[in-house]
Amino acid sequence: MEKAYKLEFRNAQLGSLYVTCCGCSKTEPLHSFGPAVKPHYMIHYILSGKGTFTIGDTTYPLEAGYGFLIPPEELVFYQADSDDPWTYVWVGFSGELAVEHVKNMGLSRKQPIFRSDASDEIYAAVRDMMEHNTSGLANDLRRNGQLGIFLSYVAQDAPVRGRSEEDKANTYVRKAVEFIQSNYCNPIKVTDVARFVCINRSYLYTLFKNAMGFSPQQFLTSFRITKATELLQLTELPIESIAISCGYTDPLVFTKAFRQLKKRSPSAYRKEYLSGEGRRNKEDRKQVEEFINQINALHTI
C-alpha cells in the first residue's frame, strides 16, 4: 500500500516545458511500481527511507538525498525497502525543452541517478505545485515556474561528471555562443561569458580555440561586426546608433574594430554596399556565410 497525494494536469500543455503531474508518497514496506513505462519524463526525489530503482539490467539502491530519472517509454521498476520504506516526491514534465534540459543536466537512461542536498527546497517546489492545482492560466504558469525551480536544484548536483570531457567542453562552448548571440547588443566582455558558463576565462579561451579555431574575444567581435554589417545594409541608422545596438558604448572603438575586420570604416562600407555589387561585397557575404556555417556546425556537435 502507498499513502500518496498526486495530481495530473492533462490540459496544462503550456509552453515548451510544462508539468504533467506531481505528487508526494509515503510508502509501505516493499511497495513497488512496475515493471511499467511512463509517457513523459519523471523525476523522483527521496525525502527519507530507502528503496531500489531498476532500469534495463541495472538496479540502484537509493536512500534519502538521492533521486532518479524515468525517461519516456522506458521500462522501469522501483520498490520501497522492507525495513525503512521511502517517502518521495515526484514531478512529471514534458515539452520541447524537456529533452535538452535532461541532457544538459547529465541525466539519461545510462545515468539516471543524481544526489542533491536541497531536500527542503525540492519539497517546497513540489508542494507549491500541488497547492496550485486548479485549472487556469495563473496556476499553469505558477506550476511551470516551480518546475524550473525544481529542475534547477536537480541540475546543481546532477552528474555532469558522467559525461565525457569532450561532451562537457562542447556544452561549455555552445552555451557561451548562445550567451553571446543573445547579449551581443549589451556591453558584455569575455569575463561575463566565462562567468555565465561557470568556468574561468583561460579555460574558455582553450575550449574556443579547440572547437572553433579562434578566441572568445575574436568570436564576440566578429559576431558584433557581422550584426553591424546587417544594420548598415538594411537600415539608415546613424553609425553611433549601430555601434550602441551592437554593444559598443564608444563609436570610435566600434569604428576601429569594424575597420580591423572589414578593412574600411562603417560609413565607407555602407557607401560601397549601396553603390552596387562590388567584388568586396561578394567577399564580405562569403565571409559572413562561412562564419554562420561555423556557428551552425557547433550546434550540431
Image: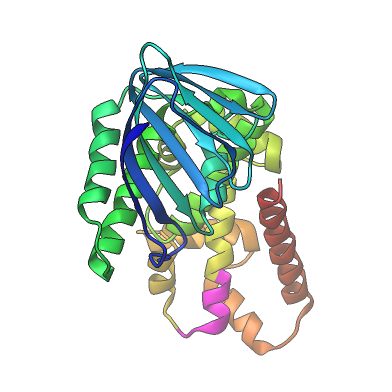
Q: What is the x, y in percent for residue 1? A: 37, 31
Q: Relative to 187, is 30 above or below?
A: above
Asked if residue 177 can be seen in this view, the reply is: no
**Magenta residues (range):** 229-236
Magenta span has 231?
yes
**Which color scheme does this rendered protein use?**
rainbow
The extreme bottom residue here reads 275
Which residue lies at the image location 34% right of the left edge and 55% below the top edge?
A: 144
Which residue lies at the image location 56% right of the left edge and 37% below the top edge?
A: 172
Q: What is the x, y in percent for residue 230? A: 57, 74
Asked if residue 238 can be seen in this view, the reply is: yes
Which residue lies at the image location 69% right of the left edge and 24% below the top edge?
A: 57
Q: Relative to 246, is 82 above or below?
A: above
Q: What is the x, y in percent for residue 250? A: 37, 59
Q: Relative to 192, is 133 above or below?
A: below
Magenta span has 86?
no
Which residue lies at the image location 63% right of the left edge and 28% below the top edge?
A: 163
Q: Observer-nearest residue: 15 or 235?
A: 15
* Relative horizontal placement of residue 116, taking residue 70 as reference (left or right): left
* Relative horizontal placement of residue 135, taking residue 110 as reference (left or right): left
Q: What is the x, y in percent for residue 282? A: 77, 74
Q: Observer-nearest residue: 33 or 284?
A: 33
Please state, as top left, top right, bottom left or bottom right, where the C terminus lies in the image: top right
- How many labels sit on residues? 0
Q: Main secondary structure of the magenta part?
A: helix
